[in-house]
Image (cartoon, rainbow, N blue to C red):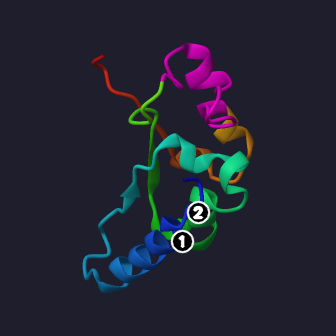
Amino acid sequence: MYAGYGIDYIIQFQKALSANVDNKNLLFTHAPQAPYFSRKYYHDKGYYKVEKEIGHLIAWYNIQFYNQMSTSYDSYESLFVKSQEPFIGTSFKEIMDLDAIPLHKLVLGKPSTP
């Protein structure tokens, strides 16, 4: 469940896409779910691997703090300060504190409707 096998595909796809787009004024962004930033599950993989290998091709990450089929990010504390099980270490602050991704590339995505 947490193997992150799709990360290598994402890296290969982004490289191919960037190499084959003629308009170099386009910006590429990604919108991964917050758990893909979990060091508990992905260690040096997940979106940390994406940033390390192809971060120069990505303008920003609009992190989805929704669609996890849980209530993991349903309070100020769990969304901004310290996340809860099962997605430990994935609150916005915890992702920022790792210094693995430049702060100017982190965007918080949260729906405004219930």
Span shown in magenta: 71-93
**Where is residue 10 drawn, in percent x and y?**
44, 69
Q: Quadrant of the C terminus?
A: top left
Q: Report whether 48 appears left or right of 32.
A: right
Relative to 81, say whether 49 is above or below: below
Check disc 1 and report the residue beneath it: 54
Whether residues under marks 1 and 2 lie with C-beta atoms below 8 angstroms apart, the answer is yes
Which element type, helix, strand or loop, lies under badge 2?
A: helix
Q: Nearer the viewer, residue 97 or 44?
A: 44
Q: Principal SS element in the magenta part? A: loop
Q: Residue at x 52, y 73 (%)?
A: 8
Q: For mark 1, does the 10 Å Cα neighbourhood hold few (<14), some (14 to 19), or many (20 or more) residues? A: some
Relative to 92, say whether 74 is above or below: above
**Where is residue 27 drawn, in percent x and y?**
34, 62
**Where is residue 76 drawn, in percent x and y?**
56, 15
Q: Residue at x 60, y 48 (%)?
A: 37
**Where is residue 15 drawn, in percent x and y?**
43, 79
Q: Quadrant of residue 85?
A: top right
Q: Report whether 104 appears left or right of 13.
A: right
Residue at the limit of the structure toward the front, as seen here: 1
Q: Report whether 28 appears left or right of 2.
A: left
CA–CA distance in space, label 1 to label 2: 5 Å
Q: Residue at x 74, y 45 (%)?
A: 98
Q: Please tell me whether residue 50 belongs to the stretch shown in magenta.
A: no
Check disc 2 and report the residue beneath it: 51
Q: Nearer the viewer, residue 114 or 97?
A: 114
Q: Residue at x 66, y 31 (%)?
A: 93
Q: Amino acid at mark 1?
A: Ile
Which element type, helix, strand or loop, lies under badge 1?
A: helix
Q: Amino acid at mark 2?
A: Glu
Q: Quadrant of residue 46?
A: bottom right
